[in-house]
Image (cartoon, rainbow, N blue to C red):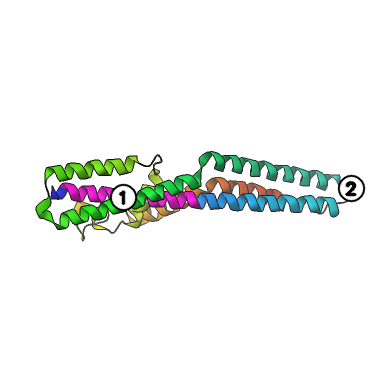
Protein backbone atom coordinates (compact mmCIF):
# COMPACT_ATOMS: atom_id res chain seq x y z
CA UNK A 1 0.00 0.00 0.00
CA UNK A 2 2.86 2.34 0.82
CA UNK A 3 4.48 1.89 -2.62
CA UNK A 4 1.15 2.24 -4.39
CA UNK A 5 0.31 5.51 -2.62
CA UNK A 6 3.80 6.87 -3.32
CA UNK A 7 3.37 6.11 -7.03
CA UNK A 8 -0.09 7.70 -6.96
CA UNK A 9 1.34 10.79 -5.26
CA UNK A 10 4.06 11.05 -7.93
CA UNK A 11 1.47 10.67 -10.68
CA UNK A 12 -0.70 13.42 -9.17
CA UNK A 13 2.38 15.65 -8.77
CA UNK A 14 3.34 15.11 -12.40
CA UNK A 15 -0.21 15.75 -13.65
CA UNK A 16 -0.58 18.92 -11.59
CA UNK A 17 2.80 20.20 -12.80
CA UNK A 18 1.89 19.56 -16.42
CA UNK A 19 -1.44 21.34 -15.97
CA UNK A 20 0.23 24.33 -14.34
CA UNK A 21 2.51 24.50 -17.37
CA UNK A 22 -0.46 24.19 -19.72
CA UNK A 23 -2.21 27.07 -17.95
CA UNK A 24 0.91 29.25 -18.25
CA UNK A 25 1.33 28.32 -21.92
CA UNK A 26 -2.28 29.22 -22.74
CA UNK A 27 -2.00 32.50 -20.83
CA UNK A 28 1.17 33.39 -22.77
CA UNK A 29 -0.59 32.62 -26.03
CA UNK A 30 -3.62 34.67 -25.01
CA UNK A 31 -1.38 37.62 -24.05
CA UNK A 32 0.57 37.38 -27.31
CA UNK A 33 -2.69 37.27 -29.31
CA UNK A 34 -4.04 40.34 -27.51
CA UNK A 35 -0.75 42.19 -27.98
CA UNK A 36 -0.65 41.26 -31.69
CA UNK A 37 -4.23 42.40 -32.29
CA UNK A 38 -3.55 45.72 -30.55
CA UNK A 39 -0.27 46.38 -32.37
CA UNK A 40 -1.57 45.29 -35.79
CA UNK A 41 -4.60 47.57 -35.35
CA UNK A 42 -2.34 50.49 -34.40
CA UNK A 43 -0.05 49.83 -37.39
CA UNK A 44 -3.06 49.62 -39.71
CA UNK A 45 -4.39 52.98 -38.48
CA UNK A 46 -0.94 54.55 -38.77
CA UNK A 47 -0.59 53.34 -42.37
CA UNK A 48 -4.01 54.74 -43.24
CA UNK A 49 -2.98 58.14 -41.86
CA UNK A 50 0.37 58.04 -43.69
CA UNK A 51 -1.33 57.05 -46.92
CA UNK A 52 -3.88 59.85 -46.62
CA UNK A 53 -1.58 62.64 -45.46
CA UNK A 54 1.90 61.95 -46.80
CA UNK A 55 1.59 59.76 -49.90
CA UNK A 56 1.26 61.79 -53.06
CA UNK A 57 -1.11 60.81 -55.83
CA UNK A 58 1.86 60.79 -58.19
CA UNK A 59 3.19 57.62 -56.54
CA UNK A 60 0.53 55.01 -57.38
CA UNK A 61 2.93 52.11 -56.74
CA UNK A 62 3.54 53.24 -53.14
CA UNK A 63 -0.15 53.89 -52.57
CA UNK A 64 -1.12 50.45 -53.91
CA UNK A 65 1.54 48.71 -51.79
CA UNK A 66 0.37 50.43 -48.60
CA UNK A 67 -3.20 49.43 -49.43
CA UNK A 68 -2.11 45.79 -49.76
CA UNK A 69 -0.20 45.92 -46.45
CA UNK A 70 -3.21 47.48 -44.70
CA UNK A 71 -5.48 44.75 -46.08
CA UNK A 72 -3.08 42.03 -44.89
CA UNK A 73 -2.95 43.56 -41.41
CA UNK A 74 -6.75 43.72 -41.26
CA UNK A 75 -6.96 40.10 -42.38
CA UNK A 76 -4.45 38.95 -39.74
CA UNK A 77 -6.36 40.81 -37.01
CA UNK A 78 -9.52 38.98 -38.09
CA UNK A 79 -7.77 35.59 -38.24
CA UNK A 80 -6.16 35.99 -34.79
CA UNK A 81 -9.47 37.11 -33.28
CA UNK A 82 -11.29 34.08 -34.70
CA UNK A 83 -8.53 31.67 -33.60
CA UNK A 84 -8.56 32.96 -30.03
CA UNK A 85 -12.35 33.04 -29.91
CA UNK A 86 -12.47 29.40 -31.00
CA UNK A 87 -9.60 28.27 -28.77
CA UNK A 88 -10.92 29.94 -25.57
CA UNK A 89 -7.39 29.93 -24.21
CA UNK A 90 -8.10 32.05 -21.13
CA UNK A 91 -11.03 29.85 -20.08
CA UNK A 92 -9.00 26.66 -20.53
CA UNK A 93 -6.05 28.14 -18.64
CA UNK A 94 -8.28 28.99 -15.67
CA UNK A 95 -9.84 25.50 -15.62
CA UNK A 96 -6.44 23.77 -15.82
CA UNK A 97 -5.01 25.96 -13.06
CA UNK A 98 -7.94 25.21 -10.72
CA UNK A 99 -7.59 21.49 -11.43
CA UNK A 100 -3.85 21.63 -10.69
CA UNK A 101 -4.64 23.28 -7.33
CA UNK A 102 -7.02 20.41 -6.47
CA UNK A 103 -4.34 17.88 -7.42
CA UNK A 104 -1.89 19.67 -5.11
CA UNK A 105 -4.37 19.34 -2.26
CA UNK A 106 -4.71 15.65 -3.13
CA UNK A 107 -0.92 15.22 -2.94
CA UNK A 108 -0.83 16.72 0.55
CA UNK A 109 -3.62 14.36 1.61
CA UNK A 110 -1.58 11.34 0.45
CA UNK A 111 1.49 12.78 2.20
CA UNK A 112 -0.51 12.83 5.41
CA UNK A 113 -1.65 9.24 4.78
CA UNK A 114 1.95 8.11 4.32
CA UNK A 115 3.01 9.92 7.49
CA UNK A 116 0.49 7.86 9.49
CA UNK A 117 1.47 4.52 7.95
CA UNK A 118 -0.58 2.55 10.48
CA UNK A 119 -3.75 3.69 8.69
CA UNK A 120 -2.68 2.30 5.30
CA UNK A 121 -4.97 -0.39 3.92
CA UNK A 122 -6.54 -1.46 0.66
CA UNK A 123 -9.85 0.43 1.09
CA UNK A 124 -7.88 3.65 1.68
CA UNK A 125 -5.74 3.07 -1.41
CA UNK A 126 -8.85 2.37 -3.50
CA UNK A 127 -10.53 5.54 -2.19
CA UNK A 128 -7.45 7.64 -3.01
CA UNK A 129 -7.18 6.18 -6.52
CA UNK A 130 -10.85 6.90 -7.22
CA UNK A 131 -10.45 10.41 -5.80
CA UNK A 132 -7.49 11.05 -8.09
CA UNK A 133 -9.40 9.85 -11.14
CA UNK A 134 -12.40 11.98 -10.15
CA UNK A 135 -10.28 15.13 -9.74
CA UNK A 136 -8.50 14.56 -13.05
CA UNK A 137 -11.77 13.92 -14.88
CA UNK A 138 -13.29 17.02 -13.28
CA UNK A 139 -11.43 19.20 -15.79
CA UNK A 140 -12.88 19.07 -19.29
CA UNK A 141 -9.51 20.11 -20.77
CA UNK A 142 -6.26 18.19 -20.75
CA UNK A 143 -2.66 19.32 -20.94
CA UNK A 144 -0.52 18.68 -24.02
CA UNK A 145 2.51 16.33 -24.16
CA UNK A 146 4.74 19.40 -24.43
CA UNK A 147 3.53 20.52 -20.99
CA UNK A 148 4.45 17.18 -19.44
CA UNK A 149 7.87 17.24 -21.16
CA UNK A 150 8.46 20.71 -19.75
CA UNK A 151 7.60 19.49 -16.25
CA UNK A 152 10.02 16.59 -16.61
CA UNK A 153 12.68 19.06 -17.75
CA UNK A 154 11.97 21.32 -14.77
CA UNK A 155 12.20 18.38 -12.35
CA UNK A 156 14.85 16.32 -14.17
CA UNK A 157 17.08 16.23 -11.07
CA UNK A 158 14.28 15.04 -8.76
CA UNK A 159 14.48 11.51 -7.42
CA UNK A 160 11.31 10.52 -9.28
CA UNK A 161 12.95 11.27 -12.64
CA UNK A 162 16.28 9.58 -12.03
CA UNK A 163 17.30 6.06 -13.01
CA UNK A 164 16.02 3.51 -10.48
CA UNK A 165 14.35 6.43 -8.64
CA UNK A 166 17.46 7.08 -6.52
CA UNK A 167 18.68 10.57 -5.50
CA UNK A 168 22.17 9.75 -6.81
CA UNK A 169 20.91 8.08 -9.99
CA UNK A 170 21.45 9.45 -13.47
CA UNK A 171 18.66 11.80 -14.68
CA UNK A 172 16.40 10.11 -17.21
CA UNK A 173 16.31 13.34 -19.26
CA UNK A 174 19.63 14.79 -20.37
CA UNK A 175 20.52 18.48 -19.93
CA UNK A 176 20.28 19.10 -23.69
CA UNK A 177 16.90 17.38 -23.97
CA UNK A 178 15.68 19.41 -21.01
CA UNK A 179 16.64 22.69 -22.66
CA UNK A 180 14.97 21.57 -25.89
CA UNK A 181 11.80 20.79 -23.95
CA UNK A 182 11.81 24.34 -22.53
CA UNK A 183 12.31 25.85 -25.99
CA UNK A 184 9.57 23.66 -27.47
CA UNK A 185 7.13 24.77 -24.77
CA UNK A 186 7.86 28.43 -25.54
CA UNK A 187 7.69 27.85 -29.30
CA UNK A 188 4.39 25.95 -29.14
CA UNK A 189 2.72 28.96 -27.53
CA UNK A 190 4.06 31.54 -29.95
CA UNK A 191 4.87 30.07 -33.36
CA UNK A 192 1.64 31.09 -35.16
CA UNK A 193 1.76 34.69 -34.00
CA UNK A 194 5.48 34.96 -34.64
CA UNK A 195 4.77 33.86 -38.22
CA UNK A 196 2.21 36.67 -38.56
CA UNK A 197 4.75 39.16 -37.22
CA UNK A 198 7.43 37.97 -39.64
CA UNK A 199 5.06 38.49 -42.59
CA UNK A 200 3.92 41.94 -41.45
CA UNK A 201 7.43 43.17 -40.63
CA UNK A 202 8.65 41.85 -43.98
CA UNK A 203 5.92 43.79 -45.79
CA UNK A 204 6.60 46.96 -43.80
CA UNK A 205 10.36 46.82 -44.40
CA UNK A 206 9.77 46.46 -48.14
CA UNK A 207 7.50 49.47 -48.56
CA UNK A 208 8.91 51.31 -51.64
CA UNK A 209 9.22 54.75 -50.05
CA UNK A 210 11.73 55.91 -52.67
CA UNK A 211 9.34 55.43 -55.62
Q: Nearer the viewer, residue 43 or 31?
A: 31
Q: Nearer the viewer, residue 51 or 138?
A: 138
Residue 18 shown in magenta: yes
Does dot 1 land on a helix, a strand or a loop? helix
Outermost residue, bottom side: 168
Left or right: where 83 falls relative to 93? right
The residues bearing labels 1 and 2 have C-alpha atoms spaced at a distance of: 65 Å
The span picked out in magenta is 4-27
- The residue positioned 42% from the left and 46% from the top of the image is 95
Image coordinates for residue 150, horizontal then vertical, percent: 38, 52
For disc 1, the marked residue is 103
Image coordinates for residue 66, horizontal then vertical, percent: 77, 47
Disc 2 residue crowd, few under 14, some 14–19, many 20+, Cα 10 Å = few
- The residue positioned 18% from the left and 41% from the top of the image is 126
Outermost residue, right side: 58
Left or right: where 160 falls relative to 204? left
Image coordinates for residue 5, horizontal then vertical, percent: 18, 49
The answer to whether residue 161 shows anywhere in this view is no
Numbered disc in front, either 1 or 2: 1
Residue 62 shown in magenta: no
- The residue positioned 59% from the left and 39% from the top of the image is 82
- The picture quadrant where one finds residue 74 is top right
The answer to whether residue 137 shows anywhere in this view is yes
Disc 1 residue crowd, few under 14, some 14–19, many 20+, Cα 10 Å = many
For disc 2, the marked residue is 57
- The residue positioned 72% from the left and 42% from the top of the image is 71
Dot 1 or dot 2: first in sequence order is: 2
Does dot 2 land on a helix, a strand or a loop? loop
Left or right: where 200 falls relative to 183? right
Image coordinates for residue 53, horizontal then vertical, percent: 85, 54
Magenta part mainly helix, strand or loop?
helix
Left or right: where 91 falls relative to 208? left
Amino acid sequence: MNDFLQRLQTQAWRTSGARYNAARRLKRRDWLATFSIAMFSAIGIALAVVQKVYVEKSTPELESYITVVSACIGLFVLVISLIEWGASGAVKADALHRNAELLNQFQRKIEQDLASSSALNEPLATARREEYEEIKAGCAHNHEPVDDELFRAQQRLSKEFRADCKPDGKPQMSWIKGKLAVLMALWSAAWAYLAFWVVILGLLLNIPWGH
